[in-house]
Amino acid sequence: QVQLVESGGGLAQAGGSLSLSCAASGRTFSNYAMGWFRQAPRKEREFVTAINWSGRSTAVADSVKGRFTISRDNAKNTVYLQMNSLKPEDTAVYYCAAARTNWTPTGRNEYAYWGQGTQVTVSS
């Protein structure tokens, strides 16, 4: 089992920045690829970005490319999401997830463990 706890959500203005963290516990963090997903009201949960176990490979959704950056610190069992140039359409609950794999999965079904989510609201 892997337990994931997100933090850092909140309210930001359009054009602003927010940083999310996800702390993991339970199993060897460095064995897992980590991903961020988001779900807006009345919409499907969608992929945002992922990072492989070493941190050397990432995948990023087109909608956030150039604005969001994922990183990880295996010594701290933590994955981060830096969100810049925020837009109102970035408003959603953001979830981190863990996948027991060596690459950077983009599908929800590839992730076995999920956090409880943190709300991000961007005002125009």
Image: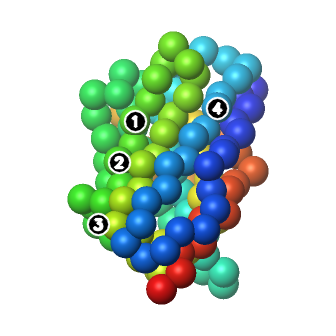
- Residue under label 3, please give it: 62
Crowding around mark 3 (Cα neighbors within 10 Å: few <14, some 14 to 19, many 20+) is few
User: What residue is rendered at 29% in x and 66% in y?
Assistant: 62
Instruction: Residue 26 in the image: state x and y as whole percent.
Output: 73, 20
Q: Which residue is drawn at 55% across and 47% down?
A: 20
Task: Please give left or right for residue 47 compared with residue 116 in the image.
Answer: left
Residue type indicated by callout 2: Thr
| Mark 4 vs 3, N-terminal side | 4
Q: Can residue 101 be seen in this view?
A: no
- Label 2 belongs to which residue? 69
Q: Name the residue under label 4.
A: 23
Q: Which circle's residue, 1 or 4, is located before the other in the chain?
A: 4
Using the numbered discs, state the Cα–Cα distance from disc 1 to disc 4 in whole angstroms: 12 Å
* Structural crowding at the residue carrying mark 1, measured as other residues with C-alpha within 10 Å and reported as few (<14), some (14–19) or many (≥20): many
Q: Do the residues labelled 2 and 4 touch (CB within 8 Å)?
A: no
Disc 2 on helix, strand or loop? strand
> How far apart are labels 2 and 4 at the CA level?
17 Å
Please report contact status of discs 1 and 4: CB closer than 8 Å, yes or no.
no
- Where does the N terminus fall, quadrant-wise? top right
Tell me the residue that label 1 is attached to. 71
Q: Left of 26 or right of it: where is 102?
A: left
Amino acid type, residue under disc 4 in the picture? Ala
Mark 3 or mark 2: name the one nearer the start of the chain. 3
Extreme left residue here? 66
Rendering quarter of residue 93 = bottom right
What whole-number distance in Å separates the C-alpha atoms at marks 3 and 1?
Answer: 18 Å
Q: Where does the image place residue 52, in percent across and percent down from the top left?
A: 38, 32
Q: Answer yes or no: do the residues labelled 1 and 2 have beta carbons within 8 Å?
A: yes
Q: Distance between the residues labelled 4 and 3?
A: 26 Å
For the residue labelled by badge 3, is the local secondary structure a helix, a strand or a loop? helix
